[in-house]
Image (tube, rainbow, N blue to C red):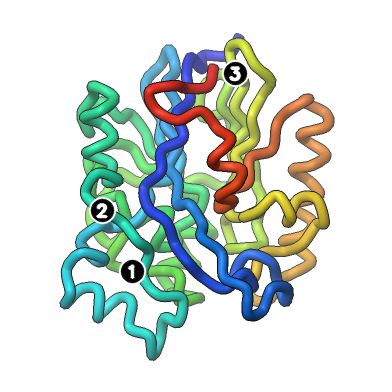
Amino acid sequence: MTQVRKLWPLLTATHRYEKTLSTRNLGAGTFIEAPILAYLIETANGRILYDVGCDYAKIADPVKRAQWYDPATFSFGAPQMNEDQRLPAWFSRLGIAATDIDAVFLGHLHFDHAGGLCDVAGCEIHVQHDELVSARAREDVGYFPDDFSADYRWKVMQGEYEVVSGVSAISSPGHTAGHMSLLIEMPKGPPIILCGDSADLTENLDKEIAPGLCWREQETMAVDSIRKLKRLAETEQAQLWPNHDMAFWRGLRHFPQFHE
């Protein structure tokens, strides 16, 4: 039986960028507004965060912003983020503290998924071995080494596994070397698959389009992961949740509501 009790999608920032970043080789000249999300999963065995959003200081501090989002090397521009969207603000609204988070599960280590680790330091951090190696080598500009250089409590894993009863780590590489999705068995509704950046948009799933950024240009690997998640969703009768789709995000239940 699943240990999952509740699921909150948390909007931590938004990011305006050219659509080609989400749909490989498609959407040039079209700009989209994408949500940057974290997901809080409450279980009978503790609280898990899937992703943690950006490091607020790198956006709010002009010096750090110029360093990390220098247009000469980072053409996407900085996300839009305010104090109320930081994880500590969400924790306050939820009536908990950072110390009440038992584990963070990182789908991958790009800046908009791992930057907020500074706000949850102290808990166990799940990450794939291949992802950590790739990120530390900064194989693409989406990795900000400062985000994951602190002495965190890493739980370095290899492959798929059960995080707790009802929460399963699903391998979905392609966008990055060790990208992971999460299958969540809900207590009342259908299971949910958090696709992470294996599928930014519903369009990635419907048309089986790789994300714009693929690890070592492995487009086929990325598409194979999309197909794998779709097969899993069919087998488990699960919902697929794309990660950066504003229209999809608006259709979800927002705090103080939750999914169960």
Residue 185's image quarter? top right
Residue 87 in sight from this viewpoint: yes
Residue 176's image quarter? bottom right
- Name the secondary structure under disc 1: helix
- Name the secondary structure under disc 2: loop
Q: Which residue is mark 1?
A: 145
Q: Which residue is mark 3?
A: 186
Residue type, mark 1 in image: Pro
Viewer-nearest residue: 146 or 113: 113
* Residues packed near mark 2 inside 10 Å, few (<14), some (14 to 19) or many (20 plus): few
Q: Split into 4 quadrants, where in the image is the N terminus?
A: top right
**Sequence-earlier tag: 3 or 1:** 1
Residue type, mark 3 in image: Met
**Image coordinates for residue 134, horizontal then vertical, percent:** 50, 68
Residue 44, compared with residue 71, is above or below; it is above
**Sequence-earlier tag: 2 or 1:** 2
Q: Which residue is mark 2?
A: 82
